[in-house]
Image (cartoon, rainbow, N blue to C red):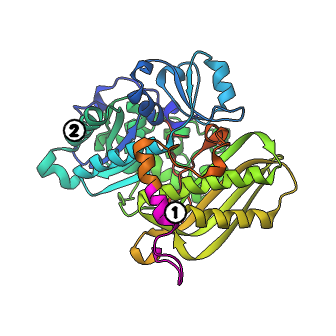
């Protein structure tokens, strides 16, 4: 059960927009069915219909579903084939990652107009600390209402906002406010809000942990809050027990951190049919390198390490990586390294999935992009930057390598994976529209 499913929306005036927001400086802004909302914005005739965005091939996975589609049981991360069986009348659309990234950048700029303390979690959600915005914009609930209004009127996109004393409670608040709502959890009512919820609503409790807690009699957040810590440890271990016990009492001291950085940028493809042709893999790697490099340039970053991910027909997954002498955002260099890694790996079994990832990210300062000694002053990066401009004006298919002209099916089968946003060396993937409540 996802967190949004665990948080059935019920009218409760204690947590409505008129509730007391004293001591509630934290906002969690979460775009509603983000990928679908972007698609409906450019195709208004789809408004109100069941719409599913995701891989449309035989092995595709749902990235986002409209709320009418969810009424039929369609959910993010569900196989597309299952979604078709549940809702055959739905409109199924392939993802358009550049469009979602562009919309996300505009959303984040609107949020940053309210406060510099914005901590993005993914393309479609972010925490804000609006304590410093009171003099200009008013109380936290007024800031939340202003942001919702701006995003709706300027972008034509709906979002939900939770207002609370802490990040964790604000995130639960936005989930309960969905779709297109605003919910305040007053500081004095945090326990009343939290403790009736099922344990699955706690941050860090997945299906296995929830089942383990239920086996020892802990079904609600209140059960966990009042249980002896030893009982919680017996279900989930010592470290997790302490963390969950604190959350169950609404204690979450983490500040909003605007310094979070993207740890990696990646793209991957799952084939409809397992393949064994190295030339087909080569074309895939070339396309994925181009997408990854484009995202790096769009975000003003370069990366030092190139990695490939190969999933074989029996679901074994192999990763290989190589650190470059200089950081790069050039598709040609990323592809050359990825292809070299694949040739060295030389898998003997058919391949189900191929991915390219760039890690060790940093700002794209001028020094990082100096040509090597003896290299022409204007080279591949200039050509790719020009291609970026053409793609922005005429669409992503306007310019691409000649070897990909016969590989149109690649676009229909692909998915883009967002790099984990982390603090320091942690590698905790944050939920986005592909798997979150949305």
Report whether 405 appears left or right of 139.
Answer: right
Q: Which mark is residue 263?
A: 1
Q: Residues within 10 Å of mark 2 (few under 14, many from 20)?
A: some
Report whether 108 appears left or right of 115.
Answer: right
- Whether residues under marks 2 and 1 lie with C-beta atoms below 8 angstroms apart, the answer is no
* Pick the front one: 97 or 127: 97
Residue 430 seen in the figure: yes
The residue to which callout 2 is attached is 146
Give the secondary structure at mark 1: loop
* Pick the front one: 393 or 246: 393
Q: Residues within 10 Å of mark 1 (few under 14, many from 20)?
A: many
Q: Residue furthest bottom?
A: 373
Q: Residue at x 75, y 49 (%)?
A: 280
Q: Residue furthest top?
A: 89
- Residue 100 in the magenta stretch? The answer is no
Report whether 266 appears left or right of 173.
Answer: right
Q: Quadrant of the N terminus?
A: top right
Separation of residues labelled 2 and 1 (CA atoms): 31 Å
Question: Does 38 sit above or below residue 309?
Answer: above
Question: Does 274 sit above or below residue 50?
Answer: below
List x then y, in percent, for residue 352.
Answer: 76, 46
Q: Nearer the viewer, mark 2 or mark 1?
A: 1
- Residue 375 in the magenta stretch? The answer is yes
Residue 428 sits in which quadrant?
Answer: bottom right
List x then y, in percent, for residue 184.
Answer: 30, 37
List x then y, in percent, for residue 24.
Answer: 27, 47
Give the secondary structure at mark 2: helix
Report whether 183 appears left or right of 203.
Answer: left
Q: Residue at x 60, y 59 (%)?
A: 357
Identify the magenta region: 369-386
């Amino acid at each position: 059960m996802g967190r949004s499913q665990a948080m059935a929306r019920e009218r409760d005036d204690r947590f409505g927009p008129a509730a007391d927001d004293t001591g509630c400086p934290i906002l969690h802004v979460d775009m509603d069915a983000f990928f679908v909302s972007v698609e409906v914005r450019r195709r208004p005739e789809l408004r109100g219909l069941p719409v599913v965005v995701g891989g449309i091939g035989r092995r595709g996975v749902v990235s986002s579903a409209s709320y009418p589609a969810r009424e039929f049981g369609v959910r993010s991360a569900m196989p597309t084939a299952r979604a078709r069986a549940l809702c055959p009348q739905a409109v199924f659309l392939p993802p358009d990652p550049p469009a979602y990234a562009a919309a996300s950048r505009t959303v984040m700029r609107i949020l940053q107009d309210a406060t510099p303390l914005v901590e993005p979690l993914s393309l479609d959600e972010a925490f804000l600390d609006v304590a410093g915005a009171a003099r200009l914009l008013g109380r936290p609930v007024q800031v939340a209402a202003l942001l919702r209004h701006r995003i709706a009127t300027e972008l034509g996109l709906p979002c939900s906002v939770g207002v609370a004393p802490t990040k964790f409670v604000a995130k639960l608040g936005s989930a309960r406010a969905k779709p297109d709502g605003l919910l305040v959890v007053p500081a004095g009512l945090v326990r009343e809000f939290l403790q009736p919820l099922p344990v699955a609503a706690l941050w860090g409790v997945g299906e296995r942990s929830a089942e383990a807690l239920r086996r020892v009699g802990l079904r609600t957040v209140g059960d966990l809050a009042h249980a002896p810590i030893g009982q919680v440890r017996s279900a989930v271990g010592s470290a997790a027990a302490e963390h969950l016990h604190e959350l169950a009492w609404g204690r979450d001291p983490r500040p909003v951190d605007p310094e979070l950085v993207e740890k990696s940028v990646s793209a991957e493809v799952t084939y409809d049919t397992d393949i064994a042709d190295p030339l087909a893999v080569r074309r895939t790697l070339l396309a994925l390198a181009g997408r990854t490099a484009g995202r790096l340039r769009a975000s003003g970053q370069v990366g030092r390490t190139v990695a490939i991910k190969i999933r074989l027909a029996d679901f074994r997954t192999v990763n290989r990586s190589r650190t470059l002498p200089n950081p790069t955002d050039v598709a040609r260099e990323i592809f050359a390294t990825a292809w070299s890694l694949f040739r060295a790996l030389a898998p003997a079994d058919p391949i189900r999935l191929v991915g390219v990832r760039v890690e060790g990210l940093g700002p794209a300062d001028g020094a990082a992009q100096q040509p090597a000694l003896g290299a022409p002053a204007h080279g591949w990066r200039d050509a790719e930057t020009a291609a970026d401009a053409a793609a922005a004006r005429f669409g992503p298919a306007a310019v691409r390598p000649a070897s990909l002209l016969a590989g149109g099916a690649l676009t229909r089968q692909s998915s883009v994976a967002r790099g984990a946003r982390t603090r320091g060396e942690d590698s905790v993937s944050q939920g986005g529209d592909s798997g979150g409540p949305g």
